[in-house]
Amino acid sequence: MSDEEVMSEEEEEEVEEQRGGEAEFLKRQEHKRSDLDEQLKEYILEWRRQRSKEEDELKKLKDKQAKRKTLREQEEKRLTEKKRQEDERRVREMEEKKQREQEEKLRRLEEAERKRQLMLQAQKSSVGGKLTLQAGDDDIMGMGSARQELNKTKEQLEEEKRISMSFRIKPLDVTGLSAEALKKKAHELWEQVVRLETEKYDLEERQKRQDYDLKELKERQKQQLRHKAMKRGLDPEALTGKYPPKIQVASKFERRVDTRTYENKKNLFQGDLEKLHKETTDKAWTDTVKAFDERQKTKLHKWFGERPGKKKGEPESPDEEEVNDAALPDTYEEPIFEAEAEAAHENEQEEEEEEEEEEEEEEE
């Protein structure tokens, strides 16, 4: 065998070994790939199971949400219907109340108009246009409801005026009337206008007279208040204002806090100052007398066996209250006061000066 044949055999073995290694490597790779595929299949199956479970739960939630939405819509419809019924009932009640008030107002105005017409007829039929008012005629004249009229709003007054005018002014129906009837109707309307204008003029003059009387009464009242204020020593215009005059109850220069009440300070300006001064003086005198009576009383010492100030016929003082005369000195020096001591000292100095002058004169 030659060397070339030996080399070829070795190469073939090496090639075969390489092929065998490659085959094993491929098998291992194939095995790993199959394991990965199986794991991936398991992951995909698990994901699909989780996804189907989530989809089921989501579907259940959507169904529950749809049911809840349906129930909410039904509840809202029911509440809306209930609210609408309540609103309709409220509106119906308000309309019924307004209608009742309107009917009551119409009835009241009809009654007032009827009474007014009766009063006008009675005035026309009475002698000289005089009429004696009976009890309850204040309501006919409208004076009984004056307070209620003041509390009414402008809209209410306009509504009542419109209703009252609808009663007083009847609609004019001229259909089917002839020329003579129209002339007669026009003449009646003219007479009615003249009568109303006359009544209007009379009422205006009456109002002017009442205004003048009120003005004169107010001026008289002001004059009386001026005289009253002058009598009290106040300013003449003090009582004519809207509010009463202020009462000066303390001085503006007072530096201490005044703890007295308004009534007490007011009474001082109404004549109680003298009374307060008298009470204060009496109280001070009583306190002084009481302090004098409660003082400690001491008796004078006896002078030569007799107490000073004792009157004839008075009994002797008790012995226990007497002062022991043995403890006192036998002789007493005459007391010397400061003024007397100074005067004696000056006299001594003058005598010494005079003696010195005499000695000097003798020496000369």
Image: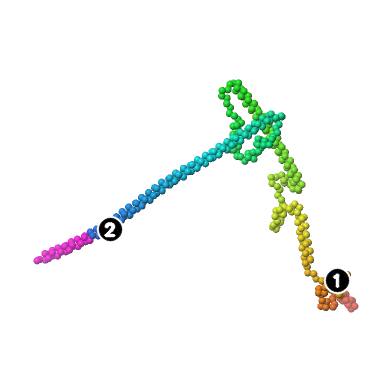
Q: Amino acid at mark 1?
A: Pro
Q: Which residue is mark 1?
A: 315
Query: Does 233 appear above or below 3?
Result: above
Q: Nearer the viewer, residue 159 or 84?
A: 84
Q: Nearer the viewer, residue 103 or 210?
A: 103
Residue 34 image position (x, y, % from top left): 24, 58
- Magenta stretch, residue numbers: 1-28
Label 2 Cα neighbours within 10 Å, binned few <14 / some 14-19 / many ≥20: few
Q: Which residue is mark 2?
A: 39
- Give the mark nearest the N terminus, 2 or 1: 2
Which residue does the image show at 69% across and 35% down from the upper left? 134
Q: Secondary structure at mark 2?
A: helix
Provide the major secondary structure of the magenta segment: helix
Where disc 1 sits, the SS reads loop
On the question of residue 200 being in view, the answer is no
- Judge left or right: residue 102 versus residue 254: left
Report x, y in % for residue 191: 64, 26
Image quadrant for the C terminus?
bottom right
